[in-house]
Amino acid sequence: MLAKTLTAALTLALTTGAATAQCGGDFGQFVRGLKDEAVANGHAPATVDRFFAGVRHDPAVIKADRAQGVFQLDFTTFARRLISQNRVQTGQKKAQQFADTFARIERDYGVPRGILLAFWAFETDYGAFQGDFNTANALVTLAHDCRRPDLFRPQVMAALELYAHGDFDPATTTGAWAGEIGMVQMLPRDILENGVDGDGDGHVRLKTSAPDALMSGANMLRSLGWRPNEPWLQEVAVPANFDWSKSGLDHQMNAGDWQAAGVAPRSGQMLRPDLPASLVLPQGRGGPAFLIYPNYRVLFEWNQSFVYVLTAAYFATRLEGGPVFDAGSPAPGLSGNEMKQLQQKLVAQGYDVGKVDGILGEKTREAVQQLQLKLGLPADAWPTRDLLNRL
């Protein structure tokens, strides 16, 4: 494993000065600061010069960072957009093609193939579209931008470490606009810490080797707390007279207790009655309903979008033979602009919604649920135009 050979260098490279790093200002001067930091961290000046020689600011990266409107879609629309019959069939073929790799993963890491296939599908369409942004430029541009420099400056140093080890070319390595690389889109620091040489060629090549990419992804999920031989999500049916205020990620009890309260598996049996679970209603009491288990929460470390994670978790069940979810008849949701208006009004009344961005994230859901309780409405955390009008 690559991470084992780089632990000491990684610790030095990623901790020195990262938390207090400056951002913004003249880009050339900013790059010189990165180079000084890299040399201070023990890299040879000649190596540092070669790595940063062609780095350029990329305005397209900033534009992409500011335009993530897809996450404003509701769960059903988002899921139907991402999950096509072709993706289901291709996932089944990939499961057969790399059956030995998935068997190793399930044995050594305890991560089921459905989870990895789902992220492989959504991130790069099973490796077909891995992104064409120059990764070095993307990382340095985002480190220079003052929105999230504490996230991306360490990633620049991690990419430099990969370069020094022969596993990154700043001139030719490409990927997503946010610096993720390869078939399952991992950031350089994650590759350093969790990269696995799955095909035994002595390198971790996430762009060209499916075994490397899949085993590295599994290793990362295990390091984030994935629990072997446990479920992650189960579709359920909820009685109409249920106490909806018990729904949401911040409410939890054993799955068996949910069942005793009237929550029933939509098909089959309750997967693990002994495990803690939360009831998730992505579109309120009229829409789909899921119980999520502890492993589901691990997926938020891969992607922090509620709708993305729920869709990936559901798609993983489909790829392992689960049924199509029941979309129900949810009340119409809010547009992006209406969601921003709602968030602004909630903030004005003292609620914490996180960022006012038009995206129905977990904090906004919790604020909506609190407001619904205050107004004596069914507290299912689903904002409607009626709720917006009441504000």
Image (cartoon, grey):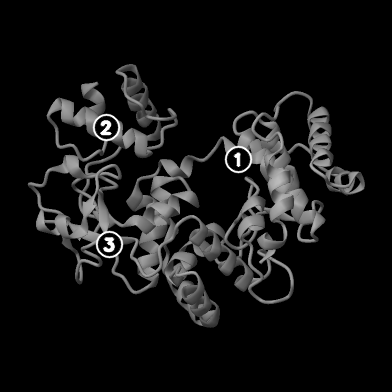
Between marks 2 and 1, how big is the CA–CA gap? 29 Å
The residue pinned by badge 3 equals: 234
Number of numbered discs overlaid on the protein picture: 3
Please tell me whether mark 1 or mark 3 is closer to you in this view.
Answer: 3
Circle 3 packing at 10 Å, graded few (<14), some (14-19), many (20+), is many
Q: Is residue 326 above or below residue 158?
A: below
Which residue is most to the right? 46
The residue pinned by badge 1 equals: 64
x, y percent for residue 292: 30, 55
Which residue is most to the left? 241
Which residue is most to the top? 348
**Residue at image x 29%, y 35%?**
366
Left or right: 308 as drawn, with respect to 27: left
Amino acid type, callout 2? Val
Secondary structure found at label 2: helix
N-terminal-most mark, 2 or 1: 1
Between marks 2 and 3, how big is the CA–CA gap? 24 Å
Please tell me whether mark 2 or mark 1 is closer to you in this view.
Answer: 2
Q: Is residue 6 above or below residue 330?
A: below
N-terminal-most mark, 1 or 3: 1
**Residue at image x 43%, y 54%?**
298
x, y percent for residue 168: 76, 57
Depth check, front residue: 333 or 140: 140
Left or right: 200 as drawn, with respect to 312: right
Residue 343 lies in what quarter of the image?
Answer: top left
Amino acid type, callout 3? Gln
Residue 304 in sight from this viewpoint: yes
The residue pinned by badge 2 equals: 368
Secondary structure found at label 1: helix
Left or right: 167 as drawn, with respect to 303: right
Residue 134 in sight from this viewpoint: no
Residue 190, disc: none
